[in-house]
Image: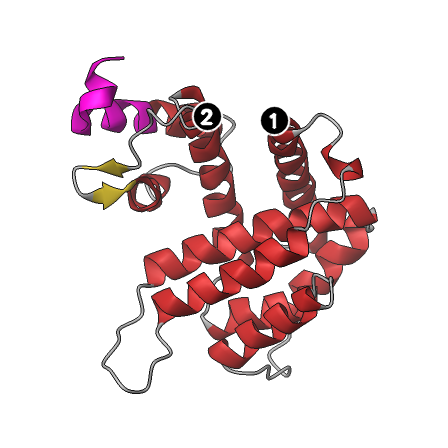
Amino acid sequence: MTATSFGSCLREMMDLQHTHNQQVHPQWHKQGYPFHRAIWTECAELLDHYGWKWWKLQEPDLVQVKLEIVDIWHFGLSMIIVAEQSVEELAREMLEREQDCSVVGPSFIPSVEALAQQALDRRFDTIAFMDMMNALPFPLQDLYGIYKGKNVLNRFRQANGYQDGSYQKFWKGKEDNVHLAELVLTVDPYDAKFLSELYSQLENRYCELTAEGQRL
């Protein structure tokens, strides 16, 4: 992946994020929403899925860890849009951090804590974010695919009663996030039909596995 190609992916993700945020408020970027607070809260949830307790045996749930990272990216993107950061400069910085093998960042948990610390200071630190990604590892290409997938899931939730409480988040014992992670692997995120194809697959699985879906 080149800086130019990732720049295109970054613009697409920013456009999707902007559209999603508009569902909350048409002028969301002028509301002063505390995206930084959402980031450090998500960091805590991420560590619970990864495991940090020394007094008990814990195995990382990497599917949920990656989904939490994608949630953090939603809020990070929102801060990037509000700050009007240069897309070209940001794409180059993130890609260089991923590709520069001479850069040895902190291990996973310290990198998550560094990201949370910066969020407490009301900043989204892309270097700390990339260090966390590299330590897992979680390539930018995979972030792009799962981010787009989560955007589709968010739209699907809203269309199926998320706000009024009728939406079922667990489908036959598994959270919808987990079903999403499975379905994303079956669709090419660079395909022009990715968004519509994934939405259709989510709809089919929801109707098949939930009582609410069967009533649609």
Can residue 96 be seen here? The reply is no
Please name the residue shown 22% across and 13% down the image: 215
Range of residues picked out in magenta: 201-216
Of 171 and 32, the residue lying toward us: 32
Of all residues, the one furthest to the bottom in this rendering is: 55
Please name the residue shown 24% across and 28% down the image: 205
In the image, taking residue 90 as reference, residue 213 lies left or right, namely left
Image mark for residue 23: 1
Can residue 23 be seen here? The reply is yes
Please name the residue shown 60% across and 84% down the image: 104
Task: Label 1: state its secondary structure.
Answer: helix
Of all residues, the one furthest to the front in this rendering is: 164
Q: Earlier in the sequence, mark 2 or mark 1?
A: 1
Q: Amino acid at mark 2?
A: Gln
Identify whether 114 is placed above or below 87.
below
Residue under label 2, please give it: 158
Where, by quadrant of the figure, is residue 89 drawn? Answer: bottom right
- Could you tell me which quadrant the C terminus lies in? top left
Of 208 and 211, the residue lying toward us: 211
